[in-house]
Image (spheres, rainbow, N blue to C red):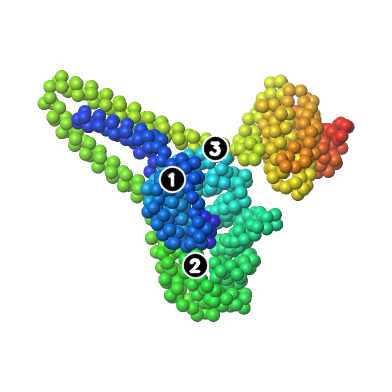
Amino acid sequence: MPAQLALVLPQFLKLLTQKGQMLIIKNLRKITVLLSVVSALFNLLIQPATAASETTVSADELKQQPAFPAEYQKLSYPQRLDWLKQQLKTADSAARIYQLSSEMGFEHFANYANDKLQLVCQQTKPEKFDLQYRYICAVSDNNSYDDSIRQLMQLYDDAINAKNIDLATQILSGVAWKQSSNGDIASAFRSYELAMSLAKQASPEALNDVMLNTAALYVMHGDKAYVQKGVQLQQATISRLEALKRDTPESADYANEILALTYHNIGVAYALHLHDYQQALHWFGLITPNNKELRRSSLVFSALSAAELQQKEQANNLLTASLQAPKSTEVNTDYLDCYQQLVQLKLQGVAELQPCQLLNTQTPLEVSLDLYKRMALLETAEWRLHGLEKLHQLFIVKLEPQLKQSATQSASHAELSRLQLESELKTQLLEKEQSLKKAEQEQHQSQMMLTAAVLAILLLVLLVITIQLRQNRKLAKQFESLSVLDGLTGLHNRRFFEQNIQRELNFVRRSQQDGTGHTIAFYLLDIDFFKKINDSYGHDAGDEVLVEFARRIKLAIRETDMLIRWGGEEFLLVARLEQKTDHHHIAERIRRVVNQQPFDIANQNTIPVSCTIGAVVYPEAGHDVVQLDWHHLVQLADAALYLGKKKQRNCWVCVDNIVDLAALDDILQQDLEQSAQQQQIVLSSKFDATTTTTS
């Protein structure tokens, strides 16, 4: 879903699909019929593989085709289609036909003509190497939800193998759009969040598009907390766009266009969903008057917000300006006429109801609900009655059918199954009467052949089910891998840590019970002056430092230790200890492996890098240890890290033991050195060449 569609708060279709229908075959009358079914199923299985192997155009042949003239870029959408059709009439090779036809598909895609795009995709099927053309054909396919998702995920694999991160991000975004259109909003949320994780390695445009689409989904389908989360995502996009304008002035036009759209969408979220009209006025006010597409919409919603705040003079001025502003040429915004009349009614007590009575049937559901709810609360009887009637119609026409859709589909399938069963029972009775007249030998032979045919069919059905299960399992593994890995360093992320840390805690508690003496230590690692590295050498260099830092730490620890990208330049290590002093050795080994050799950065001089380490050892067994969870240990390690950064950096500070677990809350709230002086903890540290221990 393009980010620009968020302008009109589109309504996603909530369609329920029936999956995994069972194939039931019994009491077939003729063996020849059974064998023909076996043959047909076999042909269905092998035909896709044969078709997929056919290649009409190669990538090299396509590259050799002449480029389109410069004048082509200046043509309008209909003019481009006419030009392409004329060129197709004289095309003399399969590669040229493919080039022109696929370009026609891209034109339909850019102008949201999905039906025409699908026709082109059917007539000129995408080649395997042509990832972009395959993507627009798959994302516009509305015939089969499951098939479309499978195509997109296969394309995602190919994009990852080709290291096309932008396209891979775009594909996940397309998957999320399909899921939301199909009514699976929860899966769409997860897919967008996975796309955001991957988009951190992609271009700024790809990341902005995914974040704005995710924010739009949060605002349209989420509760108050998700709406606020959507606003936060949009605000993060604003920060990134401002940085893009500073770093690359040539991207200013793109950044300003997306900034204006983001300001508008945040204003809509505050005005229609959070009802914080002061904030809505602030965000709409950031849109410059020369933005013709958003000008009228921002003025109308600003007038509405000012009227709700009883700022009548400002509301009147904004309403007058909105009446003079031109309408959008890209999207249908006739519903703004109704909002204008609502503002006028609130300010002057008189307005025309007709614009609200003539709302377009394509008006987004969220906008219709907001308008009719506002009318239903008015004191004017005619307006209130119209609002109540329209709310009732919305329930009858849109909301109630969506609620009943699942039950209706289930009922229709149940009725079909009943009729099939009734037909089968009648057939069985007829066949039983006829079979009594047949000779025993003929009956025995028929049963043998019937059994063989049914077994063959069942084997083929099992084969189909097995292939589908493997595909689904592959999709599940892909999503699971994306959800627990950090896209930059390849390390596990916080989610993986939360899923597996209880295993480590159970290990140390068992060790304490059986007296083996094994325990674990938590280490928080922070790269010193990382912001300065980013500011001095650029964010790409900062990313290279993070990757190299992770690589060096992995060399210094065991494979059984858990190394996590905790966030930003912070890493979390959970290591098992066999000796009481192992935790000091591990901390010092990490510190040395980081700072002994400078970091080599591409296209840069070497960069000296060091880190500060805060650590805590799981305390000895006691009745209060049961109440200790990993959150406390991470907090203690973070406090030790803070102490090391305050003292010197390029050092480690370790909480060797928690002497007084009953005072844990006090320990977490005060400076660790104070806790050590009060003999609540045992504290060790390494600054330069000096190691100290404080009890």
According to the image, label 2 marks what residue? 329
| Tag 3 residue | 161
Looking at the rendered structure, the secondary structure element under dot 1 is helix
Mark 2 is on which residue type?
A: Thr
Tell me the crowding category of disc 3: few under 14, some 14 to 19, or many 20 or more residues within 10 angstroms, Cα based. Answer: few
**Nearer the N terminus, badge 2 or badge 1?**
1
Q: Nearer the viewer, residue 629 or 18?
A: 18
Can you give x and y, in whole percent of width and height, for residue 145 in the image? 42, 46
In this rendering, the answer to whether 275 lies above or below 559 is below
- Residue 71: x and y in percent read 50, 60
User: Under tag 2, what secondary structure?
Assistant: loop
Which picture quadrant has residue 682?
Answer: top right
Closest to the observer: 331 or 439? 331
Q: Nearer the N terminus, badge 3 or badge 2? A: 3
Residue shown at the point (49%, 72%) measured from the top left: 337
Residue type at mark 3?
Asn
In the displayed structure, 674 sits above or below 379; it is: above
Q: Give the amino acid type for the residue marked by disc 1 in the picture.
A: Ala
Tell me whether circle 1 and circle 3 mark residues in contact (CB < 8 Å).
Answer: no
Task: Give left or right: position of 505 versus 261.
Answer: right
Which of discs 1 and 3 lies nearer the camera? The answer is: 1
Badge 1: how crowded within 10 Å, few (<14), some, or many (20+)? many
At x 50% / y 48%, what residue is drawn? Answer: 174
Residue 664 in the image: state x and y as whole percent: 76, 38
Lower sequence index among marks 1 and 3: 1
Indicate left or right for 304 with 510 as reference: left
Which residue has dot 1 on it? 95
